[in-house]
Image (spheres, helix red, strand yellow):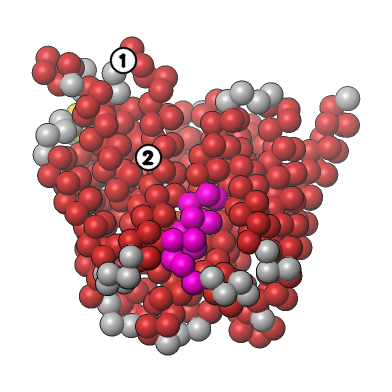
Amino acid sequence: MSNIQTSPDLPPSVERSRGPLAAVTAFAFWAVMVGTTVPTALYPLYKSQFAFGSLAVTILFAVYAVGVVAGLLVFGRVSDQVGRKPVVFAAVLLAAVAAVVFLTAQGLPGLLVGRVLSGFSAALVTGAATAGIMELFPLARKGRAPIVTLLSNMGGLACGNLIAGLLADTGIAPLRLPWIVHGGLLLIALVSQAFVPETVTVTGKLKLAPQKLHVPREIRGVFLRSAMTGGAGFAVLGVLTAVTGILLASELHLTSPALTGFVVFLAFACTALGQLVLRRMRPAIALPVACSALILASVLVALAVLAASLTALLLAAVATGFGTGIAIGCGMLAITTGAAPQLRGAAVSTFFAILYGMLSLPAVGVGVLIQLSGLRVAGTTFAIVVALIAAGVLLSLTSQKKAAE
């Protein structure tokens, strides 16, 4: 078992440079997360280049989520054992390897390998970079550190879609240029990590063991409601990420990678916005608002598919992101304020395992339905299922409120 302590005495030069050093780690976090969504805008191009179907596209997306869950469960505590800096460095290096795999892929197998590696890199960087930013942040502005980590994480997810789409739209090696640019960002992150000091003192040895999943009894109700609502939102995010390009091309005859990237960018950007808005909401109304937003998003997804409406698709992305962000924020707030410190790590791993499970499985299900019955039937069926989940949580909250009265 490792023993980890925050380094109490950083050199004076480091103390004076806390802000820039935290920014360097935040950039590394952002750059890794950018790579996880670069493929989104490129899926239609890969589909055409390598001649695979819609189901393969959704599987490509799903294996990333599987990689993230596996990485969180196995590597979630590695930075507590060996320190923040080496884990962030390893995550950036692994993301670079994934970029090279995508750059040289000759078919679906190569893309699948790249997606799994991206999932591992995201899992590694999330815990280590979040902790590193918190520990490096200037003491007088410590309260802003969570916002920086949120923007690094969700900002990276959002920007990857948009950057890849804009670069692919130039027509200059559309399946290569985005990865070359991403590789350049990762190179900057790798080099800059050499100047970041270790923020913790570790006295343990590396020991990889699966993180046990656990839901603390004292927060079980709000935890499960937040996880189901956030999971429903993640399901919509997953499907939007996997099939937006297919919908735009087949139903709206719009083949711009930049447009595909913008739709998903909007969803992830609004997920970050939802978490920020939560800070100003009364706790009693937060989850009901999130559920209502996801029910609205489901209606808009069905409308976008049935009426081939770009406006409905854009509004669905906004509503999905907003509701998902609030639900995630509710779950994390419950864990940080209501769970015992020794149980928080397992609770966070369990929370995100649920979210990423619901991110991947529905996307594959929709891919299967597209193959069997077409995009419109698949999209409408999926929208109904998400609406029922959100409505179920909303009814549960209403019943809880009446019982309390």
Is 260 part of what is drawn in magenta? Answer: yes
Compared with residue 134, is residue 379 higher up or lower down, i.e. above or below? below
Q: What x and y, as percent, mark residue 31?
A: 29, 48
Near mark 1 (Cα within 10 A), the count class, few <14, some 14-19 or many ≥20, is: few
Near mark 2 (Cα within 10 A), the count class, few <14, some 14-19 or many ≥20, is: many
Residue drawn at (16%, 51%) of the image: 187
Question: What amino acid is labelled 2 in the image?
Answer: Ser
What stretch of residues is rendered in magenta?
A: 255-267
Question: What amino acid is labelled 1 in the image?
Answer: Leu
Mark 2, residue position:
152
Which one is closest to the eye, mark 1 or mark 2? 2
Compared with residue 153, is residue 9 higher up or lower down, i.e. above or below? above
Residue drawn at (41%, 43%) of the image: 155
Q: Nearer the viewer, residue 361 or 145?
A: 145
Residue 117, picture quadrant: bottom left
Say whether residue 139 is visible.
yes
Residue drawn at (31%, 43%) of the image: 29
Marker disc for residue 139: 1
Residue 151, picture quadrant: top left
Is 173 part of what is drawn in magenta? Answer: no
Asked whether, in this view, residue 314 is left or right of residue 348, the answer is right
> Quick one: which residue is furthest to the top in this view?
140
Residue drawn at (74%, 51%) of the image: 295
Q: What x and y, as percent, mark residue 87?
A: 23, 45
| Secondary element at tag 2 | helix
